[in-house]
Amino acid sequence: MTVFILDTCTYTKYALRSSLVESGIKESIRDLDDINSLKSKCRKATPTIIFINQNCFQYHSDGNELKAIIEKQPLTLFFIFIGNENIKFHDFIPIKDNVIIVSKFIKISSLIMIIQYFMDTKAWHNANSAMGFSPLHFSKTEAEILKMWMSGFNTMYICNQLGIKEKTLSSHKINIKRKTKASNKQVIYHLISIANSVTDSINIRAAI
């Protein structure tokens, strides 16, 4: 097993390394400095797990590079940590078969559980599996609502555009929050922004 850790925080790297070793993952664990280093290493080996801090691909070009790496490494499990400490998200959300957005506040035991399950079954994304992991997916209506919501349009505008009642819109928003495990619009926006920067699976963008 080969594990790459791309994070500028020394404490995070130390905590991850220690936790992995304590959990029995004692093989190759390497710290990397930037996306280019990750790209170079992935040309030479297929890592089992890659941990990446969102802050390491804050620029558009870095996001494109990371997206290309993810596409070329379908058997690698990617954890993307939310870099903004003001975002109150304490869970994890799969956005692709092998990509999970993770809170830095997540319990180590939960992180190890995900890794072990992935290693044991290679089917963590199966909605029928014991853990029920399934990549984030929105219905057509939810996607339309989310796009307008993230763009700042108000309730009346969205209802008029879709020809639905406020109660129906509210129900859709509740489903969106449930699917993203987010408590508010700010967290949802941040999760979708990360997802859009590294994969085409979630194709929802705010209007510019």
Image (cartoon, rainbow, N blue to C red):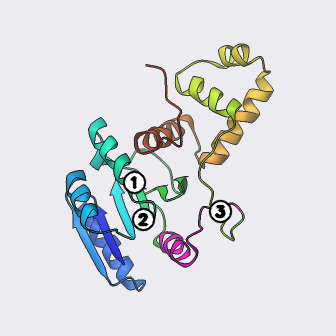
Q: In percent of the image, x 43 and y 43: which residue is there? A: 194
Q: Is residue 84 visible?
A: no
Question: Any mark on residue 70, and which?
Answer: 1
Residue 64, given in percent of the width and then of the height, sits at 33, 41
Q: In percent of the image, x 36 and y 62: which residue is there? A: 51
Residue 178, given in percent of the width and then of the height, sits at 67, 47
Q: Amino acid at mark 3?
A: Asn
Q: In percent of the image, x 41 and y 86: which residue is there? A: 24
Residue stretch rendered in magenta on the structure: 109-127
Question: Any mark on residue 76, and which?
Answer: 2
Tell me the element at label 3: loop
Mark 1 vs 2, N-terminal side: 1
Q: CA distance from mark 2 to mark 3?
A: 16 Å
Q: Amino acid at mark 1?
A: Ile
Q: Nearer the viewer, residue 103 or 126?
A: 126
Q: Quadrant of the C terminus?
A: top left
**Measured along the vertical axis of the image, is residue 72 above or below residue 77?**
above
Tell me the element at label 2: loop
Q: Are marks 1 and 2 in contact (CB under 8 Å)?
A: yes
Q: Which residue is mark 3?
A: 126
